Amino acid sequence: MKTIFITILDGLTYKDLAGFRQPRAYTVISALILILLFTVSGMAMLNQYLLMSTVKATPVSISLSTQAPEATAAAQPESGSPLECPGDSSDWSLSPTYASRTYNVIQPACVYQGLEKTIAWALAVREGYSRARATELLGFDDMPMRPLQAVTIPANARGWAKYRSVSSHPILI
């Protein structure tokens, strides 16, 4: 009865004409892949260790400075009363945030006032409430947002593309 070691050895090697054991081709390739895998993982662990030891050895203080934009004299009305929030979206601008490179903030900030209930309505609809039920629960007279039948968006540098809604679902209309 052969031992398990002899069985594994017979699977990984063969005897040549002289009677010596030679490794099979897939054994050599598998061994090379394992050596390469262990080398790469060892280098990654060493790199992580060196990086973390450098971070722990030299603490760096982080300071975020937020500079408030200075108000210009032309922006203030002559009567001294505060500016009214512009209702036209063409008067708004986008400014970068410190927290993310992806998202921008609408300026002036007064545009955001009163959006809490609208956002709550949108979240309620997303969580499964019907549009009518969410409108009723949040105390709106009519729906704050309605689905559009067609939307025109910039398609590329050459022009605009018009997309039509094809939804026939009664809750989404």
Image (spheres, grey):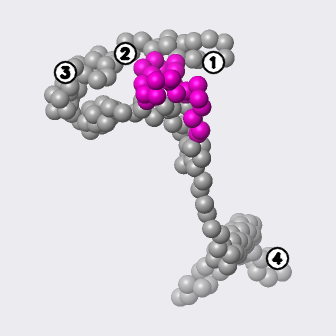
Answer yes or no: do the residues labelled 4 and 1 have beta carbons within 8 Å? Answer: no
Region rendered in magenta: 69-93
Answer few, some or many: residues within 10 Å of disc 2's Cα (few below 14, many 20 plus, some between 14 and 19): few
Residue 18, position as x, y percentages in the image: 84, 81
Amino acid of disc 2: Leu
Helix, strand or loop under label 2: loop
Residue 26 higher or lower than 8, as above or below: above
Q: CB of mark 1 within 8 Å of CB of mark 2?
A: no
| Marks 4 and 2 close (CB-CB < 8 Å) | no
Measured Cα–Cα span from mark 4 to mark 1: 71 Å
What is the number of the mark on residue 156? 1
Instruction: Give the residue number, with chain letter if any, for mark 2.
Output: 148
Magenta highlight on residue 87: yes
In the rendered view, would you say 19 is above or below 87? below
The three-letter amino acid code for the residue at tag 1 is Asn
Marks 4, 1: nearer the viewer: 1
Check disc 4 and report the residue beneath it. 17
Quadrant of the image containing the C terminus: top left
- Label 1 near label 3: C-beta < 8 Å? no
Say which of marks 4 and 2 sits in front: 2
Question: Marks 4/2: CA distance?
Answer: 81 Å
Q: Residues within 10 Å of mark 3 (few under 14, many from 20)?
A: few
Disc nearer the start of the sequence (2/3):
3
Residue under the image location 63 percent in, 77 percent down: 56
